[in-house]
Amino acid sequence: MFMGDSDIDNHVERQEKVKADLFEAILGAIAIDTDWNPDELQNSVEFMLQIDDFLEDVDTEEERPDKFKLENAVTTLKELAEHGRCSIPQYDQPDEMTQLNDGRMMWECTCYIRSWAMSKTAYATSKKRSQEICSLPSIM
């Protein structure tokens, strides 16, 4: 990021608005450079945000607001779509359990949110829980 002397003196690089503008500019450049390839945009967002790493650092001792709890994730995501904040989430969930590399049988679910160029796959011991888990990072 190029900054003038006064920007450096005022530490504008610490401001959330400046970070958001820079992130948006980078994504715009990637979109144009890749001819709006959704896979490339998805990979870039995941790389830059490292959502899974962020969620690992979240203090789980602190009570989350109800709308950000796992059991409400699917409903909250649906409400966001109804209010025009994102596209309607699409879930891909096979009819049979998936065998993981370690031999465990789990239900798999992938949540796609086209307007956010985001997808998340989760595995759980029940169909419902796999859908909740793959929805939660989308609303955080």
Image: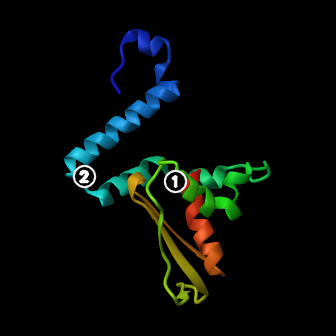
- Residue identified by numbered label 2: 36
Residue at figure coordinates x 40%, y 37% from the top left = 23
- Kind of residue at disc 2: Trp
Residue 106, given in percent of the width and then of the height, sits at 60, 84
Q: Residues within 10 Å of mark 1 (few under 14, many from 20)?
A: few
x 74%, y 50%: residue: 64
Q: Residue at x 75, y 53 (%)?
A: 60
Residue 5 lies in quadrant: top left
Q: Position of residue 13 (x, y in %)?
A: 47, 24
Q: Is residue 116 above or below residue 21?
A: below
Q: Which residue corresponds to the image point at 54% horizontal and 51% vertical from the top-left?
A: 80
Q: Position of residue 1 (x, y in %)?
A: 35, 27
Residue 113 x %, y %: 44, 59
Q: Closer to the camera, 71 or 102?
A: 71
Q: Residue furthest top?
A: 6
From this view, report whether residue 106 is shown above or below residue 62: below
**Which amino acid type is shown beneath numbered disc 1?**
Glu
Q: Nearer the viewer, mark 2 or mark 1?
A: 1
Q: Nearer the viewer, residue 20 or 89?
A: 89
